[in-house]
Amino acid sequence: EVQLVQSGAEVKKPGESLKISCKGSGYNFPGYWIGWVRQMPGKGLEWMGIIYPGDSDARYSPSFEGQVTISADKFINTAYLQWSSLKASDTAIYYCARRIREHYSRGWTHQYNYGLDVWGQGTTVTVSS
Amino acid sequence: QTVVTQEPSLTVSPGGTVTLTCASSTGEVTSGFYPNWFQQKPGQAPRALIYSTSNKHPWTPARFSGSLLGGKAALTLSGVQPEDEAEYYCLLYYGGAQLGVFGGGTKLTVL
């Protein structure tokens, strides 16, 4: 069974650092991109960025570039999301999700389907003085 | 800043049919945006329903279908069940599926 299991809830003060994790099992973890998604209290989903654990190639949404760091350790099947200095506005639930890519041929061309399929259970981060 | 727009709320009767849409501020939504749809119920993680416009995951109920409609991505629920009451989010990919943008979500009420 494909699973993503995230680390537990965190309560931090403004200015503190934090690293949360997302551990994959049941599939070839290094071979699939992992995305991170934020959900602020009572709000919608926001795409933060994505990483390929096989070579740690990370891409960020412009809104989150420079605000967080996404990393991965392919040897322990784990992706990370970290902050160097938390703000109250970082209070949210953070989800990781696996991105799938399916190849198919249409005539002489190669095509792909993309999707986020399996999601972690979410990590609640509360930042308060 | 790319904006993805969904209907804020929709209401449907049990057994009815409803279509949710997803528009891009950049223009027409095509298959190259690989539209994804997710369902989220209160207190739960999102659950994937549709990927790349119309492909279903193994767990997706048959009453959910995805398509392109009038320049937008669309999610149609046919024979709506009470348990379909939830928030629904679309996701569009930009820049070769490395950058995604979620819509604001549609709150679906079954009444």
Image (tube, helix red, strand yellow):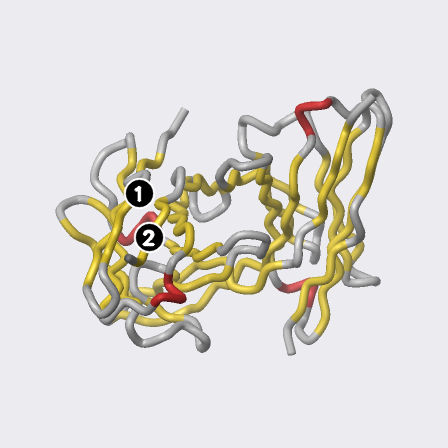
Q: Is residue A122 visible?
A: yes
- Give residue A4's position: percent from left, percent from top: 68, 63
Q: Earlier in the sequence, mark 2 or mark 1?
A: 1
Quadrant occupied by the C terminus of chain B: bottom left
Q: Find disc 1 in the rendering and name its residue.
A: B9
**Tag 2: amino acid:** Thr
Report whether residue A112 is seen: no
**Residue B75, image quadrant:** bottom left
Image coordinates for residue B41, horizontal then vertical, percent = 49, 56
| Cα separation between marks 2 and 1 | 8 Å
Q: Nearer the viewer, mark 2 or mark 1?
A: 2
The three-letter code of the residue at mark 1 reads Ser
Residue position for label 2: B109
Badge 1: chain ID: B
Q: Please, what secondary structure does the residue beneath circle 1 have? A: strand
Query: CB under 8 Å between callouts 2 and 1?
Result: yes
Image quadrant where residue B64 sits = bottom left
Mark 1 is surrounded, within 10 Å at the Cα level, by few (under 14), some (14 to 19) or many (20 or more) other residues, namely: few
Residue at the outermost left position: B70
Label 2 marks which chain's residue?
Answer: B
Please name the residue shown 51% across and 63% down the image: A117
Residue drawn at (70%, 58%), measured in percent from left and top? A54
Nearer to us in this view, A1 or A10 = A10
